Amino acid sequence: MNISLHKQTGLSLIELMISITLGLVLMAGVVQMFVSSKTVFTTQQSLSRIQETGRLAIEFLSRDIRMAGFYGCFRPNPLEEARRLQNDALVIKDLYGNFGEAIRGYASRDKLTAAEKAYLTGGELVANTNVLVLRFAAPSPRIINAANTDKTLQVYSTQAVANDCVDGLCKGDAAVASDCFRARVFKVEKLTAVAPNLSIEHEDSWSVNTNIAASFSSGEVLPMKTISYFIANGPSGAPSLWQKINQKDPVEVLEGVEKIIYQFATENDPTYKEAADDTNWAAVNSVRIFVVARSIENNAVPEPQPYVIDGETTTPVAPDKYMRQVFTATVGLRSRAANL
């Protein structure tokens, strides 16, 4: 008995169409999973970066705000004249001067003079963002250990002078002498190392000002720092938090900081208010900070994301699809705390 077997040599058109359809359905599912995974990854990455940026911004600002008005062990009355700290002859221009003023805020770049804007180089300042300037002594004292005159201070130091600098203190810098009963800010004119002492000559004589004695026989000398924080676009084009210390070039500290708002309170007026022309900066004893951190990518959220600062809602306009988060903190100036 002969049995004939039929061998299939191809696919019919119907079978081929069914196979293609099934393949397309499977591919659509795979693509959808990939797109969803990428969206979730982008969102989570943006959120993680925003939280890190916001926390670091609050940490950097809080650390320096607490130090504002620190002049070593001497604690001046901020309501007294700045002449108790600084000579009229001490001339360091722009925002790097006026060391008797511990803190000052500017509501926007429009409140700065042309010279002050030039001082904050490194990028065009972003409109409608605050500028904060802080002044205090760096916590790296040099102990006064010899008799001094109204032009020279002798401090203990084993470091050699190199390029007119000794351990972070350089010719042309501002420093403060403090003996817990008084303090005086001066400009370094010359540094001479004669082990174990360092001789610091200052530019002007203290004897011209009758509000303070001419010399210090004990105490410490500390470098003065003027730190400015502002918002400008970084090399990538994204807004960033920038920091400038004294006359050094500004540094991009944190990318993705879109806006910072500072509010100030005084001992007599505990209501937090933004910087104004009539703000009594000598009486400011605490600062409230609002930091708006933004994602780098413009597709982190499906729709423009509203955010709230101090009860006011801001809604970006499409095609703005950046993710944003607001961080806030309230920081007191240690040098002006009533309980210290």
Image: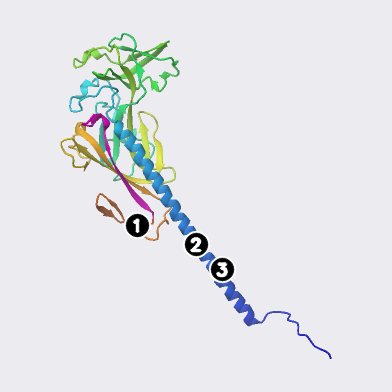
Q: Which mark is residue 35?
A: 2
Q: In this view, does 293 lie above or below 212?
A: below
Label 3: how many Cα within 10 Å (few below 14, some 14–19, many 20+)? few
- Tag 3 secondary structure: helix
| Three-letter residue code for mark 2 | Val
Label 1: how many Cα within 10 Å (few below 14, some 14–19, many 20+)? some
- Report the magenta residues as a range: 322-340
- Tag 1 secondary structure: loop
Q: Mark 3 points at which residue?
A: 27
In whole angstroms, how far apart are the C-alphas of marks 2 and 1?
21 Å
| Three-letter residue code for mark 1 | Gln
In the image, 258: left or right of 45? left
| Position in image of residue 213 (x %, y %) | 22, 13
**N-terminal label among 3 and 1:** 3
| Position in image of residue 61 (x %, y %) | 33, 37
- Tag 2 secondary structure: helix
The C terminus, quarter of image? top left
**N-terminal label among 2 and 1:** 2
Disc 3 and disc 2 in contact, CB within 8 angstroms: no
| Three-letter residue code for mark 3 | Met
Q: In this view, does 247 lie above or below 20?
A: above
The N terminus, quarter of image? bottom right
Q: Residue 305 carries which label?
A: 1
Q: Residue at x 40, y 15 (%)?
A: 157
Q: Residue at x 18, y 40 (%)?
A: 270
Q: Which mark is residue 282?
A: none
Q: Residue at x 34, y 57 (%)?
A: 305
Confirm whether the magenta stretch covers residue 327: yes
In whole angstroms, how far apart are the C-alphas of marks 3 and 1?
32 Å
**N-terminal label among 3 and 2:** 3
